[in-house]
Image (cartoon, rainbow, N blue to C red):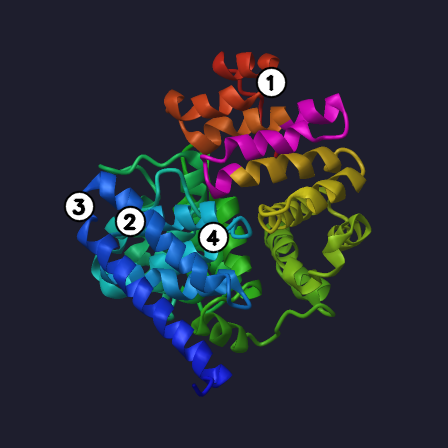
């Protein structure tokens, strides 16, 4: 018998896997109305994706490209069930924010007129760090440059989009991420007129004693440093001066207010990605500015980004945190622990484990205190949602958590 050519063998494997995926997806669709069966179907569907994507060079990019196609046959809630199963089966895939973003984009492409209703389909526990919210926002508003009058006309909608409504009771974290997404789209809507976008952030994201303008403004500047879609790159191409590693300091210093300069510097971290792998590099980058508040914002941003990229293997980032001078070492570890919960609020055990591995009892306590201080912000006022967090704390901290103690969040 004549041997098959290697190319044909590969093609045959791909076809077989393709048929298997079609079968599993069909099963997922057929049993989706039955909760008991749909969980099993989600498991099988995820298994098909994992089998395929773990054979690719970049498994995350593969999931981001293929999983959104499930929305042709299943509601977003079921697709997120598959995402959970993928993460359970593929231990290397922990940061799914971009996939959440793509799911939001896909939903709005199909139904742009009901973008606000779609926005509220974000998973209640914020799975994928609320990337779905960002995708909905960016897809709805990023393809057209608006005049100030046109922006003024939709300010009321943008102002209420992130607030509680029937069927959606967001925690402060959910709201913060939502307003952050508004910052992204304001950059597009104003054609990267950053001062104008910042002014709209203040108009939209400040309501009485609640002020989410800071996260909105960070979204404004993040948009030009972390492009995802073709329109993002087109926006950057239109900038009269484009930020680079060599000109970042002068690029950011050109803005009129320290608030803008601070957000610009902090969000400019992708230009220094390699340098930020060491404590020395982080300190050099964040002390570009001599303003203490700007330095602090920079450190917090860099710690947060490093944490999000370390969810599959937190060890190296924990070592980096330990090598930092106080108090940044404690803040770095606390942010890493919190990142597990912000990505998926069911990962409280992983968050507590980060604290338990701290190098000293005082460092452990500082980490638990950080999680406790963020608890109400992250989980909201639902005591039942907080119970799993309290249970994974050591006894003394569990008692404080269950008693409702919430240390003040340090800004």
- Residue bearing mark 4: 96
- The answer to whether residue 66 is magenta is no
Q: Nearer the viewer, residue 393 or 132?
A: 393
Comparing labels 4 and 2, the label whose residue is closer to the camera: 2
Residue 169 left/right relative to 222:
left
Report x, y in % for residue 242: 61, 73
Neighbour tally class for label 1: few under 14, some 14-19, many 20 plus, Cα within 10 Å: few
Q: Between disc 1 and disc 2, whose residue precedes?
A: 2
Instruction: Let me know if residue 156 appears in the view.
Output: no
Comparing labels 2 and 3, the label whose residue is closer to the camera: 2
Report x, y in % for residue 301: 62, 48
Magenta: main secondary structure equals helix
Q: Quadrant of residue 167?
A: top left
Q: Between disc 3 and disc 1, whose residue precedes?
A: 3
Q: Quadrant of residue 35?
A: top left
Give the spatial CA distance, label 4 vs label 1: 29 Å
Q: Between disc 2 and disc 3, whose residue precedes?
A: 3
Neighbour tally class for label 3: few under 14, some 14-19, many 20 plus, Cα within 10 Å: few
Residue appearing at x 71%, y 46% in the figure = 316
């Amino acid at each position: 018998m004549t041997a098959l050519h290697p190319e044909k063998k590969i093609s045959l494997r791909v076809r077989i896997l393709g048929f298997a995926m079609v079968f599993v997806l069909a099963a997922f669709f057929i049993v989706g109305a039955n909760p008991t069966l749909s969980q099993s179907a989600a498991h099988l569907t995820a298994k098909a994706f994992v089998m395929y994507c773990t054979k690719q060079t970049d498994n995350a990019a593969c999931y981001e490209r293929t999983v959104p196609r499930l929305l042709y046959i299943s509601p977003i809630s079921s697709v997120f069930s598959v995402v959970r199963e993928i993460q359970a089966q593929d231990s290397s895939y922990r940061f799914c924010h971009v996939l959440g973003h793509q799911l939001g984009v896909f939903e709005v492409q199909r139904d742009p007129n009901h973008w606000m209703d779609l926005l509220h389909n974000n998973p209640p526990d914020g799975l994928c760090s609320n990337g779905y919210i960002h995708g909905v926002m960016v897809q709805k508003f990023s393809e057209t440059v608006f005049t100030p009058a046109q922006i003024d006309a939709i300010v009321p909608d943008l102002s209420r989009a992130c607030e509680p409504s029937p069927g959606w009771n967001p925690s402060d974290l959910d709201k913060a991420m939502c307003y952050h997404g508004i910052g992204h789209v304001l950059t597009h809507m104003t054609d990267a007129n950053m001062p104008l976008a910042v002014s709209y952030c203040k108009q939209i994201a400040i309501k009485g004693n609640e002020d989410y303008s800071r996260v909105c403004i960070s979204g404004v500047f993040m948009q030009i440093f972390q492009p995802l879609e073709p329109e993002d790159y087109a926006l950057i191409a239109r900038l009269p001066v484009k930020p680079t590693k060599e000109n970042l300091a002068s690029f950011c210093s050109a803005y009129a207010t320290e608030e803008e300069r601070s957000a610009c510097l902090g969000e400019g971290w992708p230009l220094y990605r390699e340098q930020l792998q060491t404590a020395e590099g982080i300190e050099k980058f964040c002390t570009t500015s001599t303003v203490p508040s700007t330095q602090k914002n920079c450190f917090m941003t860099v710690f947060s980004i490093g944490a999000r990229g370390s969810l599959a293997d937190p060890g190296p980032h924990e070592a980096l945190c330990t090598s930092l001078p106080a108090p940044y070492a404690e803040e770095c570890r606390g942010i890493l622990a919190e990142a597990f919960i912000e990505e998926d609020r069911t990962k409280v055990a992983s968050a507590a484990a980060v604290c338990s591995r701290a190098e000293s009892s005082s460092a452990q306590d500082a980490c638990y205190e950080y999680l406790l201080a963020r608890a109400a912000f992250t989980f909201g006022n639902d005591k039942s949602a907080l119970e799993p967090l309290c249970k994974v704390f050591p006894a003394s901290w569990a008692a404080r958590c269950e008693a409702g103690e919430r240390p003040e969040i340090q800004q």
